[in-house]
Structures are given as structure tokens and as C-alpha cells.
Image (cartoon, rainbow, N blue to C red):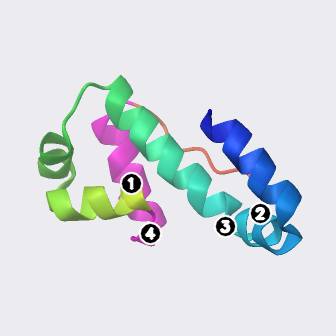
């Protein structure tokens, strides 16, 4: 079973679970974008950490959703991957 199928079944069974998941959508987006950006620029967590002046543990925490990053941290992250930080509220 694919992850998307599992989520669909779980959400259909529990509206409370769906509401909690939706409440965390922004955090999930940051996690997914961080992983995608690091993967695209072909850096390990350790290499990225070194480039932005933090620890590998902080990169891991960011990718697991256990770190609440500042905008300055996210800007350094993007710059280390030769990208630009863009934030949208909508």
C-alpha cells in the first residue's frame, strides 16, 4: 500500500486525525522542502551543516520536524544550496 493510500484510509476513518494532520501542514511542508532542497544540491546533512554553521543534528531535527527554524536559518539553508528562500501566506 502506498503512503498516500494509507493516509486516505486513515483520514476517512478519523476526522480528528485529518484535522490534526491539516493543523501541521506548514511544518510538513518545511520538512519536505528542506529534504528536497538538500537532496537537489547533493549535500549530506553534515556537509550542509558545515556550510551554514550549524550541527548535523540540527539539520536532522529540521528534516524530522523537531526544529522550529528562524527565517535567518532558512535563508542560510537556501543560500548554501544556491537557492532563494520564498515564503508564501495564502
Tag 4 residue: 70
Q: Select label 4 or label 3 by which is in front.
A: 3
Q: CA distance from mark 1 to mark 2?
A: 18 Å
- The residue lying at 79 percent from left, 49 percent from top is 9
Left or right: where 30 falls relative to 57: right
Per the image, is 53 magenta? no
Disc with the residue nearer the chain's start (4 vs 3): 3
Foreground of the two, 79 or 17: 17
Q: Do the numbered discs 4 and 3 sit on residues whose CB atoms are within 8 Å?
A: no
Chain part drawn in magenta: 65-82
Instruction: Give the secondary structure at mark 4.
Output: loop
Q: x, y (%) of residue 47?
A: 13, 41
Q: x, y (%) of residue 23?
A: 74, 70
Q: Of the numbered discs in the image, which one, if any, rests on residue 22?
A: 2
Q: CA distance from mark 2 to mark 4?
A: 22 Å
Q: x, y (%) of residue 14?
A: 83, 67
- The residue lying at 54 percent from left, 53 percent from top is 30
> Dot 1: within a 10 Å radius of its alpha carbon, few (fewer than 14), some, or many (20 or more) residues?
many
| Rendering quarter of residue 28 | bottom right
Instruction: Give the secondary structure at mark 1.
Output: helix
Amino acid at each position: 500500500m502506498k503512503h498516500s493510500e494509507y493516509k486516505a484510509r486513515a483520514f476517512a476513518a478519523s476526522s480528528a486525525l485529518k484535522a490534526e494532520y491539516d493543523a501541521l501542514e506548514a511544518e510538513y511542508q518545511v520538512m519536505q522542502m528542506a529534504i528536497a532542497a538538500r537532496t537537489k544540491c547533493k549535500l549530506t546533512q553534515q556537509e550542509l551543516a558545515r556550510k551554514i554553521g550549524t550541527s548535523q543534528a540540527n539539520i536532522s531535527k529540521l528534516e524530522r520536524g523537531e526544529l522550529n527554524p528562524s527565517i535567518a536559518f532558512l535563508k542560510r539553508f537556501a543560500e548554501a544550496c544556491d537557492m532563494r528562500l520564498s515564503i508564501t501566506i495564502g
